Image (cartoon, rainbow, N blue to C red):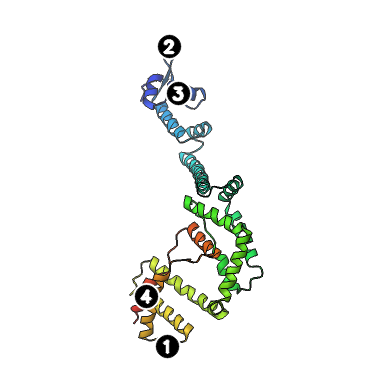
Amino acid sequence: MNERYAIGDVARRTGLSVSAIRFYADEGIVLPAGSNGAGHRMYDIDGIARLELVRTLRELDAGLDEIRHVLAGEKTLRDLATTHLELISRQEARLRSRRAVLRTILRQGSTGEQVTLMHKLAGMSDEDRDRLLDDFWAEVSTGLEVPETLMGWWRSARPQLPDQPTTAQLEAWIELAELVRDPAIRVAVRRQLHEICTTGAGPMMTASPMLAAFEEAAPIGQAAMDAVRDAVPPDSAGARAIADSWVGWLAALIQVPVDADFRRQCADNMVLADELDTGPDGDGPFDRYLTLVSAISEPQPGFPYLWLADAIRATV
């Protein structure tokens, strides 16, 4: 522990150059333990350990002032690690945004003006994104005679960009932001939503009693999704209770009695619904909106049709 080492030996032990060791001494970061008779700097084992730490921290891009504070005990290594982790996370986010913009440029052959816009879109804050979507829905809903409940559901379908989005999620966000900013798209979305409510089965499905029935079913569906998440067996008492609630809701909706045949038909319909549920499959602008929202947000589990089918069968 009392051994002293010449600067050349210290350089070999630490992997630092002699000039670097002298620099750290001149900066007051790691001082030598003393000097020999010839006036050459000598270091003890503590100095070598501190120089090894300096080298590690420099490789992690720590600044000289930060290193000085750590060695002086004014800042802990945990503090330093926290600061640099936040910095690296911000750098990663910027790199992902740039990569998304560059990939979009290569795919679309964008103009200079579009590149500037895409760069701004990729770097938007959560508040900026919300304002953009609020503006989109404010214009789309103007003059649209749609039940407020239904409009609320549509408005709530908006992307939730994770803290560390992938390049694909950022690319989807760029496309979505460009889509909702386009005046022609806004007109087309308003027209499509109007058609949804006024053509085919639209008037019946968007009537207030039907929307109220859908709202009544939402807690039952959520209970089923929670049960699947918690790995509840479909033949358990809890699962059968959820199945009974679902069957009872559906029977009341279509005004039929609940018997064994109706339960079997419900289970079969659940299986059929699972086969048909492929997400938005239309080619309208609102369908594209929903597809992009799904691509941006964290993956969410789909409705547990098959689990509910098995739970209903267990009640027969």
Q: Which residue type does callout 2 highlight?
A: Ala
Q: Quadrant of the N terminus?
A: top left
Q: Which residue is mark 2?
A: 38
- Residue at horizontal 39 percent and vertical 75 percent from the top: 270
Check disc 2 and report its element: helix, strand or loop. loop
Pair 4/2: label in front = 4
Instruction: Looking at the image, tell me whether mark 3 or mark 2 is earlier in sequence order.
Output: 3
Pair 3/1: label in front = 1
Instruction: Looking at the image, tell me whether mark 2 or mark 1 is earlier in sequence order.
Output: 2
Residues at discs 2 and 1 in contact (Cβ within 8 Å): no
Given the current orientation, which residue lies at the most extreme right position?
143
Q: Is residue 157 left or right of residue 221?
A: right
Q: Which residue is mark 4?
A: 309
Give 258 or 81, whichever is nearer the viewer: 258
Q: Which residue is mark 1?
A: 257
Q: Position of residue 206 (x, y in %)?
A: 56, 76
Q: Position of residue 250 (x, y in %)?
A: 45, 81
